[in-house]
Image (cartoon, rainbow, N blue to C red):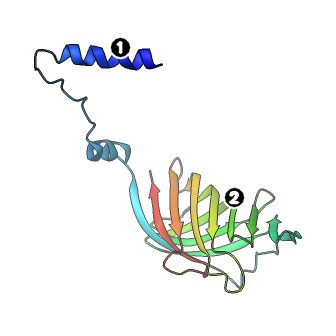
Amino acid sequence: MRKLLLLSFLALVSACADGTPIAPPMEPEMDLMMAAANAGRTQYVVQFMADFECDQCSPWDEHFTPSMSYHSGNGTNGFFVTGELEGYALISGGTNAANVNFRNGKGTGSGTLHVDLTLPAEGAFDCHWHASWEGYMPPDFMYVEYGKWFNCKGSGAFEGKQMVLWNDNSANPGWPYNEGVAEIW
């Protein structure tokens, strides 16, 4: 390994022996790369909050372990979606699960969700979701959640479209009121 490094260094020194500087490699223009990656994508600022009176909701199967961990799954939660997108999201089905360790306050969850939208158009998305939590521990449970909805496939007015949504509740620790940005393309 040392020989390879030494040979590389010697090759560089000999290339510069005449005093001509070696041009640095071209750096990509990040703004242009991001513009190309986001071409055709529309961004929406969104908020969503848990529906505590959800008629379609059901309790999650849950259990606590002696090591202060919490495991849940198979439940249904509802969320009001507001902002530049409006509608209702429903997390349901056997693919949903959440795990939280109350000793360190960290946890994760994942599953599937269905989002019915009325704004900017009538349609829906079926998505996967993932979330992580920090600070989820007694006595105050002032947690911060970071989430993502991804692999969203559209129907209705969104037929053939995709969506991704990043969100967190960092402005509202301890409350299921998240803010974020969605992209539809």
Of the residues tagged 1 and 2, which is closer to the observer? 1
The residue nearer to you, when weighing 64 against 18, is 18
The residue nearer to you, when weighing 6 against 108, is 6
Amino acid type assigned to the residue bearing label 1 in the image? Leu
Is residue 63 toward the left or the right of residue 102 in the image? Answer: right
Element assignment for label 1: helix
Image quadrant where residue 21 sits: top left
Image quadrant where residue 50 sits: bottom right
Task: Report whether residue 173 is seen.
Answer: yes
Residue 136's place in the image compared with 121, above or below, is below
Task: Rate crowding at label 1 as few (under 14), some (14 to 19) or many (20 or more) other CA atoms within 10 Å.
Answer: few
Residue 20's place in the image compared with 66, above or below, is above
The residue nearer to you, when weighing 49 against 97, is 97
Q: Earlier in the sequence, mark 1 or mark 2?
A: 1
Per the image, the residue denoted by label 1 is 7
Per the image, the residue denoted by label 2 is 110
Image x and y of residue 110, in percent: 69, 58
Image x and y of residue 176, in percent: 61, 78
Amino acid type assigned to the residue bearing label 2 in the image? Ser
**Inter-mark Cα distance, 1 to 2:** 50 Å
Image x and y of residue 111, in percent: 71, 57
Name the residue: 75% across, 60% down.
96
Element assignment for label 2: strand
Residue 151's place in the image compared with 52, above or below, is above
Residue extending farthest left: 19
Task: Rate crowding at label 2 as few (under 14), some (14 to 19) or many (20 or more) other CA atoms within 10 Å.
Answer: many
Name the residue: 27% across, 43% down.
32
Is residue 149 toward the left or the right of residue 63 in the image? Answer: left
Image x and y of residue 77, in percent: 72, 72
Task: Report whether residue 157 is seen.
Answer: no
